[in-house]
Image (spheres, rainbow, N blue to C red):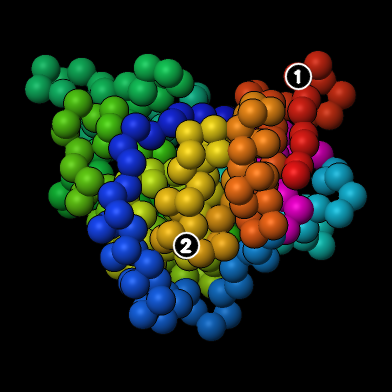
Amino acid sequence: MSRFRIRHLVAVATAAALATATLAALSTDNAASAATTLPPTHAKFDYQIGGAYTPPAGVQVVTRDRTVAPAAGLYNICYVNAFQVQPGEQSQWPSDLLLRDAQGNLVIDEDWGEALLDIRGAKAARVAAKVNGWIDGCAAKGYKAIEPDNYDSYLRSRNLISTSQARAYLKLLADHSHSRNLAIAQKNTVELSQYRASIGLDFAVAEECGQYDECGDYVAAFGNNVIVIEYTNSGRQKACSGFGSRLSIVQRDVDVSTPGTSGYVRKTC
């Protein structure tokens, strides 16, 4: 079953960091290979990580879970839970690659019941090898880009994982994605946007940046290469008011449900 992520990040990017990110983005050649294609900007978008269905008319870009096929004829982004263990998959990971505290207890994202992956030191390469296998699967299915979720898991690591370790691990995924001619997104974590060029991140997927007045921070780092998912009418209205002519914006329900279910919501600007 596909999962859903909604978490507002409390850190706000400073003006200096945003300026650095903008200069880096302008002065650095696209880290992706020549065969890599970024999502079209200001495109009609649908977020389908809660289950795949026929995209509404006019949709150009779709995100789906790595376990399902892409939507025919569209630009497809492959969702991968890259920093935490998907529910029901803990037994598929070597025990020593699950993050543990000093008492040997698993470090859990309590909101979602997910064990954090241990991406410290030499273990990062081993974790990346497994996730990169999933990325290979996304490429084989015909996806054009990767959305690696939970970049912000260091905030839930009880100070066991540093931001530098998170960035180094994400660079392993970015390099591998580019080797497969896939673009790769920064998912949320706006406070680390200044590192996008050094990691090799091509675009951003931002949840609730309208709701929390962060869309401008993402634009400062990624230009118009930002996809926005809002979960409230007020968030969508704020995002559309400020950035509706520039960014890809959609409102989904909090369960990212499928059409025909009671919770289904999909609205655009």
Where on the picture, by quarter, is residue 200? bottom left
Q: For the residue marked with disc 1, what is the amino acid?
A: Gly
Q: Could you tell me if residue 63 is visible in this image?
A: no
Q: Which residue is mark 1?
A: 263
> Looking at the image, is mark 2 or mark 1 earlier in the sequence?
2
**Residue shown at 42%/18% (left/top)?**
111
Q: Residue 222 appears at what percent x and percent y? A: 47, 62
Q: Horizontal placement of 135 versus 77: left or right? A: left
Give the overall secondary structure of the magenta segment: loop
Q: Say whether marks 2 and 1 touch (CB < 8 Å).
A: no
Quadrant in which the C terminus is drawn:
top right
Q: Residue 53 appears at what percent x and percent y? A: 81, 39
Say if the magenta span includes residue 58.
no
Q: Residue 77 appears at what percent x and percent y? A: 62, 54
Where on the picture, by quarter, is residue 173? bottom left
Mark 2 and mark 1: Cα distance apart in space: 32 Å
Q: Which residues are magenta?
A: 43-53
Q: Which residue is mark 2?
A: 222
Residue 159, relative to residue 226: is it above or below?
above
Count how many numbered circles sit on residues in the image: 2
SS of the residue under disc 2: helix
Q: For the residue marked with disc 2, what is the amino acid?
A: Phe
Residue 79, relative to residue 76: is it above or below?
above
The residue closer to the viewer here, 191 or 199, is 191
Determine crowd level at label 2: few under 14, some 14-19, many 20+ residues with C-alpha closer than 10 A. Answer: many
**Residue shown at 16%/23% (left/top)?**
101
Q: Residue 233 appears at what percent x and percent y? A: 69, 28
